[in-house]
Amino acid sequence: MSFFRDLIDGIGNLGGVTPRAGKIATDSVNPKVTYRNSQTGVTYRLERGRRRSIGLVITTDGLVIRAPHWTPIYEIDAAIDERREWVATALEKQRARLSQLAELKDGGHLLFRGKRLRVEVRQGLFEEIDLSDARCVVTTATGSIDRARLDRELWALAAQELPELAVAMAAAADLPLTAVKLSRARTLWGSCTIDGVIRLNFRLVQLPKELMRHVVAHELAHLVEFNHSPRFWKIVESLDPLCKRNRRAVKAYSVLLEL
Ligand SMILES: [Zn+2]
């Protein structure tokens, strides 16, 4: 029964594409997806499918072209050429946004609790990350930041904070929460299942606290309203009075999920 499926919230979804690493290569998972250069020099990912027209969309992967199975490449190139300026502007905006959120090198920065922390890299024998509200100091033997290690650090913080927050908010509002799990879903900030389990993305600790709370409120409200009806939004609003504003603000951070 579809009612028992997970209710997943594409709050962070940019255009409905499952993001993949932006390599210029044939995608090994989905043979329908390829990366190629157009005659205009623009690199794009091509997704062929059952559709009637060519669609252009900017994701964190860059430009994605969706085209019918039968469309020849020259037609796709022509479509890109036609919208060259739009593509260039959109790609530039996307790049600027990504670099605002994280630049993992000495003197770079990391978004943490909604603030841009300066990243400092130190040489040392032991790998260590000192992440607090005020600074991000990475000690490393190699001189470069291991992104996975930084993610583990964020995960550990999220594991301390998110379940506690969700349990407290659920208790205060008398909502039937049974468990809180962390997720690393690449397009979702949170999800909820019919048996009272909510999943929260560990990157929520990178957001300003009010936005982290907003996402938790959203998932908690699904414990009683398994939909996005007006009744659902009423519950979210009771948990987060600035619901409308925060909902919009969360969308701007969606790009974080795909770092
Ligand atoms: Zn939802």
Image (tube, grey):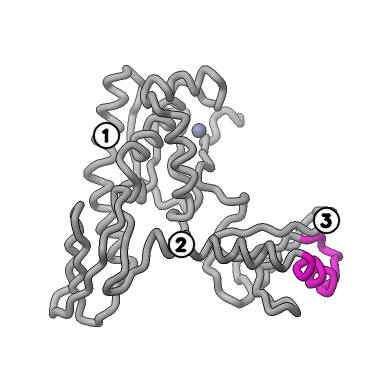
Residue neighbourhood size for the residue with mark 2, other residues' Cα within 10 Å, grouped as few (<14), some (14–19), many (≥20) = some
Give the residue at the far bottom of this rendering. Answer: 142
On screen, 1 above or below 9?
Answer: above
| Image marks 2 and 1: residues in contact by CB distance under 8 Å | no
- Left or right of 80? Residue 250 is left
User: Does dot 2 land on a helix, a strand or a loop?
Assistant: helix
Say which label, 3 or 2, has the lower sequence index: 3
Q: Amino acid at mark 1?
A: Leu
On screen, 155 above or below 229?
Answer: below
Spatial CA distance of label 3 from label 2 is: 29 Å
Q: Which residue is mark 3?
A: 53
Location of residue 140 by image quarter = bottom left
Q: Amino acid at mark 3?
A: Ser
Q: Disc 3 vs disc 1: which is toward the camera?
A: 3
Say which label, 2 or 1, has the lower sequence index: 2
Question: How many numbered callouts?
Answer: 3
The residue positioned 67% from the left and 75% from the top of the image is 42
Residues 16 and 99: in front is 99
Spatial CA distance of label 3 from label 1 is: 46 Å
Residue neighbourhood size for the residue with mark 3, other residues' Cα within 10 Å, grouped as few (<14), some (14–19), many (≥20) = few
The residue positioned 61% from the left and 77% from the top of the image is 25
User: Which numbered tag is attached to residue 98?
Assistant: 2
Q: Disc 3 vs disc 2: which is toward the camera?
A: 2
The residue positioned 32% from the left and 48% from the top of the image is 114
Residue 153 position in % (x across, y down): 25, 58
Task: Magenta stretch: give its range.
Answer: 67-82
Q: Which residue is mark 1?
A: 165
Can you say which quadrant of the picture contains the C terminus?
bottom left
Q: Disc 2 vs disc 1: which is toward the camera?
A: 2
Asked if the residue at label 2 sits under 8 Å from ligand 1, the reply is no
Say which label, 3 or 1, has the lower sequence index: 3
Q: Amino acid at mark 2?
A: Leu
